[in-house]
Amino acid sequence: MSTESGLDPMKVANAVTHAMMRGDRASGAAGISLVDAAPGEVTVTMTVTKEHVNGFDICHGGVLFTLADTAFALACNSHGPMTVAAGADITFCKAAAPGDVLTARAVERTRFGRSGIYDVTVTRGTSDGGAEIVAEFRGRSRTIGETQPGAAANPIDPGGSRSG
């Protein structure tokens, strides 16, 4: 499958999300890793450490927001054009503790004009192999009309060096 530009949407999503993660110092410092990317859908993961906890010895809400926001940012940029957050909100459902492995899965709900809406569910695994929802996040995006690595006008190779 390819777009009108002739680029494979999966290759664009893969190239853009990997390039963004390589340059994202905040997500790297938080220990966030990219697991999977497709157009409009991204999964990232992070293990809660003692550096992530607040005064109650549970994962700080800002850290949970950062995890969800990273998945959102990658998902809304996975189509190629440079896209930023117009707004976001989060609902904390359960506390996370040091040692918890959290997964954030972002899913595009709609794109219209230069705007988009994305939902991110943050979960942790349970002892029975299931998943427990820790937080729900909704992000609103705005495309600012520029291209970035992986987009048609500014492609990158899978190794990450820019060309073109």
Image (cartoon, rainbow, N blue to C red):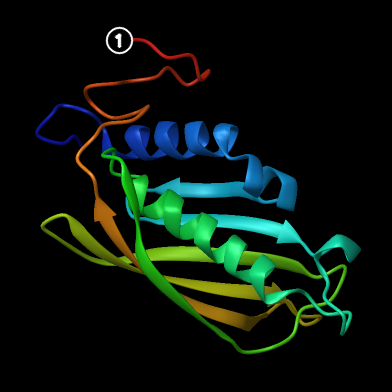
The answer to whether 12 appears left or right of 60 in the picture is left
Name the residue type under label 1: Gly
Q: Residue at x 86, y 61 (%)?
A: 51
**Hey, which quadrant is residue 44 in on the image?**
bottom right
Q: Which quarter shows the N terminus?
A: top left
Question: Is 99 above or below relative to 30?
Answer: below
Of residue 130 and residue 65, the one placed in the foreground of this image is 65
**Hey, which quadrant is residue 62 in on the image?**
bottom right
Q: Residue at x 69, y 88 (%)?
A: 94
- Determine which residue is flagged by label 1: 164
Q: Which quarter shows the C terminus?
A: top left
Question: Is 60 above or below relative to 56?
Answer: above
**Hey, which quadrant is residue 100 in on the image?**
bottom right
Of residue 124 and residue 60, the one placed in the foreground of this image is 60
In the rendered image, residue 41, in percent from the top left (x then y), is placed at 40, 57
Q: Residue at x 59, y 49 (%)?
A: 35
